[in-house]
Amino acid sequence: MKKGEERRFWFKLKGVGFTILSTEERDLVLSDFASLLSTAKEGLILAKKTKRHFSYFGYEYDAFIPEFYLMTRNFSDISYFEAEKVDGPKRPKVKRLLNPYTLSLSDGTLARILVAYRFPSNLPEGVLYSLISEASEVAILFKEIEHSRASSLTENVRRRRTAWDHLRVSEEYEASSLEELALRILSGSSFFEFYVLLVIASYNLKDLNSKEKRLRSILKGYGIEAEPPPIQEQLYSFNVCLGFLCVEKRFSDAESMKPLFFLIDEDLHDEGGVFLGISGTGSPVVLNLWKKPNQNFVIIGSTGSGKSMAAKIFVKRTKEMDEGIPVVGIDPESEYTRAFSKLQVEAVEIKDGEPLGLDPLRLMRDGALGIGQVADIIAEAYSIPEKLQGTLRKELFLASDLVESIIDFSSVVRDKELSKYLQGASVPPDSYVFQGSPPFLERSVIFGLRNVRSKRLKILISALISSYSMNKLLAKAKKSIFFVDEAWLFMETPNIVSLFENLARRGRKHGVAFLYITQRPEDLAKNPSGRAIMEQSSSVFLMRQESQGREAVKEIYRLSESEADFLVNAPIGSGILKSWGKRVTMRIIPTEDELEAFSTNVR
């Protein structure tokens, strides 16, 4: 830092998906914004957009990625909006002043800075966010005023206004607002002088003038006036004065500045992610599960909503980006196995009467299952009552080193009542599940279970395959995908759902992306482990819901009434994607090739 130069501390802030939040959630975000201003006391909040070109199989998009920064001269621990200390934003430098109102920048663009100088008494929340479509940068410069001076300023203005004899309705409202403001200041609310700066840029003067015209038209619609003062170089450096010529300052307390909140990021562009579709703002949605706190991804939608299409597209495009990522899938209706070549996986169709080699005792010795999990699976598969489940665990502990298989175990159980429940393990069709050698797992594989007629056997086989796959393949890779479709089938088996929750938790340590695809959220929500999967997944895609599921997703994901109504009437392939702090509407975009290969309606 040069001598005489002011210290500036820069923080990068994370935007939030604001417009579709519930009223309560919005209030919390706006309170954080007011607290951010009060904590920083003096500085600048800046939003700038970076243009990126995006293409995928013939789809071409220009995406504008918003970035948010805070600059403060009073260094303190900034804990709002995931603030991260940085060197500052990269901005083109000023080459020269083209005319009193236009700058020529080092990147070849022309720029102009407008200052908002008149605001109405009421502003819609997030008003400045709507300006980012035209402005390349939006900035709020602010400085906290000492409390005694703030009280004096507001009281003097209020007295002058209320001293007038004949006030119009608007003036009476303003006088009342000033009285409320004075009371807030007396109660300790922070008071600021502030400026709103809007930077527009273009490669030619004609387009720049058109942008200014459109921006001022948008502002006028909100009752805001703005002009480009003839101190453009100073404004570009966020300095509002040139000698004695200064921009007129505005005053407000932190509470009244809440509508100016603009740290809004309505799009999802994860670096290194897969293109899924288009957001409600027309921007490409790019999702990278491995950039989230956990890789769990729940897809919920009624029959025909397009949930399996969404899952297949995610798996296919992930494999296209990195064919070395192993995939293991449990496919109860064999939808995915029919498209195995497109998904770059091996398809294994399981049939009744074929030996599978999925013996739970052998899996336990291999480390794929713990003794408690084996007990839970056996108890669930053979309807062992709760009063005998402690005995089952004890028997398993005593016999685990003495017997080779579950079939042997069922014949040596000493408790006669428990032995009766286990008789089915030693005879077909169950014995086929346990006999033989387990599947050879070296690459991606999807297990289709459509030809397994018994729902009970489907559940048993799914639980054993899941545990075996996690141990043999998925846990050995840096990144992998494990998915369970038609997950509602397991809702009547709490122990199996608990097993899936355990696998999801274990998978986080190994980079396993756990996809849980279901059509009945109300059933999932009734099960503690199922609810935990729903609530603890960093990414969730909510698609069209039946009326029975509406309230469950509304309550768990804290949706507004309008959002819940949107889901009930959502078109095929559309929904709300919630991914770690962001929530955007999205429409899945399949290619013609994917549509033909993955649609359950196309044969």
Image (cartoon, rainbow, N blue to C red):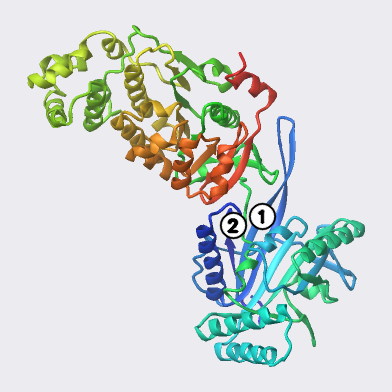
Of residues 538 and 105, which is closer to you in this image? 538
Q: How many dots with numbers?
A: 2
Residue on which the image places disc 1: 66
**Could you tell me which quadrant the C terminus lies in?**
top right
Of residues 373 and 224, which is closer to you in this image? 224
Measured along the vertical axis of the image, is residue 96 above or below residue 162? above
* In the displayed structure image, the side of residue 42 where residue 291 appears, left or right: left
Residue type at the position of mark 2: Gly
- Neighbor class of circle 2 (other Cα within 10 Å; few <14, some 14-19, many 20+) is many
Residue on which the image places disc 2: 15
* Quadrant of the rendered image containing residue 166: bottom right
Q: Which mark is residue 220?
A: none
* In the displayed structure image, the side of residue 306 where residue 484 appears, left or right: left
Q: Secondary structure at mark 1?
A: strand
- The residue at the point 66 percent across, 44 percent down is 280
CA gap between label 2 and label 1 equals: 8 Å
* In the displayed structure image, the side of residue 421 where residue 576 appears, left or right: right
Q: Secondary structure at mark 2?
A: loop
* Quadrant of the rendered image containing residue 154: bottom right
- The residue at the point 52 percent across, 35 percent down is 545
**Could you tell me which quadrant the N terminus lies in?**
bottom right
Residue type at the position of mark 1: Pro
Residue 532 image position (x, y, % from top left): 37, 42
Of residues 416 and 6, which is closer to you in this image? 416
Q: Is residue 5 visible?
A: no
- The residue at the point 48 percent across, 22 percent down is 444
Residue 547 image position (x, y, % from top left): 50, 36
Residue 554 image position (x, y, % from top left): 48, 45
Residue 187 image position (x, y, % from top left): 50, 83
Question: Are the residues at dot 2 and dot 1 in contact (C-beta closer than 8 Å)?
Answer: yes
Of the numbered discs 2 and 1, the one sitting upstream in the chain is: 2
